[in-house]
Image: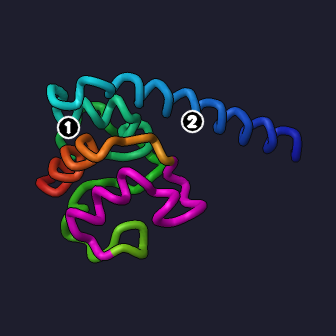
Amino acid sequence: MKTCLLALLVGTALLTGCTKAAAHHASEGHSSEASAPNLMFQYGCPTCHVIPNVPGAAGKIGPSLESLNQRSYLAGTLPNTPENLQLWIMHPQQVRPGTAMPDMGVTELDAGRIAAFIDTN
């Protein structure tokens, strides 16, 4: 049982690292042209989240982003403001160490676009 759990954790860590590197590489130099839904796919957001108005975004690991703008807090700790949403998207591990959301290397420009899109859904 412990061996299976360890293998699962190592596999998840490896996949997260690959996804992070691929997402970061995919967004380099393309931020000014990419739509928010495309950026969300590049950074892997739909893997974990249900995202309204993003076809195929049906992840079940993280919370749904539907009506996120109506919630009082982000990650249970941050007041829900556009600036805090952008901070959370860029640095979730800094905001709440140990959270399941990995730091995906989202740039400030991309995080601003993603946050603005989420705020309108």
Looking at the picture, which amino acid does disc 1 mark? Ala
**Range covered by the magenta-colored residues:** 79-102
Q: Left of 48 or right of it: where is 121?
A: left
Kindly identify the residue that appears in the image at 51 percent across and 66 percent down: 96
Judge by depth and name the residue closer to the eye, 16 or 25.
25
- Examine the rendered structure and indicate whether residue 25 appears above or below residue 115: above
Q: Which residue is mark 2?
A: 16
Query: Mark 1 or 2 closer to N-term?
Result: 2
Q: Tell me: residue 101, above or below residue 31.
A: below
Q: Is residue 63 left or right of residue 7?
A: left
Residue 101: % across, % down: 49, 52
Does 54 sit left or right of 10 as displayed?
A: left
Query: Can residue 95 be found in the magenta stretch?
Result: yes
Point out which mark residue 36 bears. 1
| Alpha carbons under labels 1 and 2: distance apart | 21 Å
Q: Residues within 10 Å of mark 2 (few under 14, many from 20)?
A: some
| Mark 1 element type | helix
Q: Quadrant of the N terminus?
A: top right
